[in-house]
Image: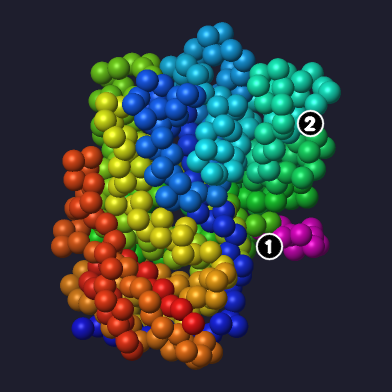
Amino acid sequence: MRKAKMILDRDYLIADIDKRLYGNFIEHLGRAVYTGIYQPGHPTADSEGFRQDVIDLVRRLDVPVTRYPGGNFVSGYDWRDGIGPKDKRPKRLDLAWKTTEPNEVGIHEFAAWAKKANTEVMYAVNLGTGTPDDARQVVEYANHPKGTQLSDLRRKNGARDPLDIKLWCLGNEMDGPWQMGAKTAYEYGRIANEAAKLMKLVDPSIELVACGSSNSGMRTFGEWEYEVLTECYDNVDYISLHTYYGNRTNDTNDFLARTMDLDQFIKTVVALCDAVGGKKHAKKRIQLSFDEWNVWYHSNQRNEEIYKEQPWGTALELLEETYNFEDALLVGLMLITFLKNADRVRIACMAQLVNVIAPIMTNPNGGAWAQTIFYPLMQASKFGRGKSLQPIITCEKHDTKSFTDVPLVDAAAVLNDDGGLTIFAVNRSLDEAAELTLDLRSFGKLTLKEHQVLVHDDLKAVNTEKNPDNVVPKALKPEKGAVVLPKASWNVLRFEA
Ligand code: AHR
C-alpha cells in the first residue's frame, strides 16, 4: 500500500469558489442542439421541442452557466438568422463544421431551454466575420427593456422581458488559423476593446471574456495574451483558456499527469494578466474563464468519414466521443486543478454538454445516458460549492514520459456552505491503493459520513445506452482514521461536524 498525507486548515483559504466553475457549453455543432437538447417529435420532447430526458440529466449536473452558440460556429454566425418565425429563418452553410444550419434554435429558444435546465446563458458574439456593432446590437436585443427598435423586436418575437444575459464572450479562438475571420493579437485586441466598449455602454452590468490562446501549444501563446490585454484590459473582465487532452499513445501514466500541464498553463496566464495589469498600474485584476476543457481524441478519424458520407448534412454525428473510465479520472484531476486555482479561475465550461465531446449522450430513436465523465463533474458541482482550501499533500512522486515529479495523489478540499468538508482525491497509481492520512488540525471533531469512489478494473470501460451503469460511483464504508484510495480511483470524501 502506498502512503499519502494531507494537512488542511479551515483558515487557509484559496478563495470563495465561483459556482460558474462547473459551467458547460452547447455549440451549434454535430448533434449538440439538433437531436441533442432539441428534437421535436421525440417521445420526451416538450411543447417547445426540448428533450426532457436530456434536461433531467443536465439538472443532475446542476450546471450554473452554459456557453452558447459557439465555438468555431459563432465566427460565421449572424444571430439575426435565429430570430422570428421559424419557417422564415434561413438555412445557411456553417463553414466551421461543414454542415447546414437550419436555424430552428436561436437566442430565444436557447434562453427558454436554459430556464428549463436551470442554467444561465453565457453568450458568445461573432468577432470573426462580425463587427463590434453586431455585438452591440445583440446586447441591445437581448437585454434592453423596451422602447427601441431592437428591444421591441425581441418583445414582438415573444420575449416581453429582457433575456438578461450577464456574461458574454468576445468571439472565439481568434488566434486560430482555422477560425473564420482569424486575427493578429493587435487586430483582435483592438476589435475586442471596441466591441466591449459598445456592449457595456448598452448594458453596464454585463461581464466580458476576451479570447486568450486556443491552447498553450499555439506558437503565439503568451505574446497573444499580453498584446490582446494591452489593448482591451480596461474594458474586459476575463481572458479565456481552452485545452483538450488525449491518450493517443495509450500511456495512461502520462495521460493522468496532464494536469501538471494544466496547472502550468493557468499559472502562466495569471502571470501574463498581472504583467499587463502591472504595466498599466491597474487596480483591477483580470480573471480566468477556462471556457473549453475536456478529453478529446477518440472521435477524430470518424469525423472525416462522416464528412465523406454526408457532405453539408445537418445533425451529423461529429465529435462523438465514447468516454472510458480513465478519461473520467483525468476529468476529476482537471476539476481538482481548477479548485486549487479557484482564486483566479472563476469560470470553467466543460466542452461540451450533449453528444459533442460530452458527458450526456442521446439516441435520436431512443434514450439519453450519462458517460463516465458525467460523474466527477456531477459530484464536483454538487459537493464543490463553498470555499476552496489550500491542501498540503505529502506523497511519492514519479516521472512519466512528459512530466517529472508527478504526485501519486492529487486532491482539493472544499469547506462547504453548510459547514461540512468535502475532499476530492485521485490516486494516480495504476497498481496500488494509497492510504491517505488526514491531518484536519483546526476542524475539531469531524466525522467521515460518506466515501464515494469511481473505480473500475478496466481503464477502458465505458457506459453505453444498453449498459449505462457500467462506470458509476459506489459508496464505500466510511473509515475511521486513514482513508484508503483504491488504485486508479476518483474519491469524494464528505465530512460532517
Ligand atoms: O469544442 C469544440 C471546438 O473546439 C470549438 O468549437 C472550438 O472553439 C474548439 O477548437
Residue under label 2: 145
Rendered position, 98 above or below 355: above
Residue 173 picture quarter: top right
Q: Which residue is mark 1?
A: 274
Can you see residue 132? Answer: no
Report the mark closest to the observer, 2 or 1: 2
Residue at image point 69% right, 38% down: 164
Amino acid type, callout 1: Asp
In this rendering, position of residue 18 left or right of residue 36: right
Q: x%, y% of residue 321?
A: 30, 41
Residue at (26, 30) in percent of width and height: 366
Tell me: 306 left or right of 98.
left
Distance, label 2 to label 1, CA atoms, is 37 Å
Residue type indicated by callout 2: Pro
Residue 475: give its label: none
Region of the chain picked out in magenta, as a range: 273-285
Q: Position of residue 257 (x, y in %)?
A: 34, 64
Q: Quick check: 182 above or below 337?
A: above
Residue 278 magenta: yes
Q: Earlier in the sequence, mark 2 or mark 1?
A: 2
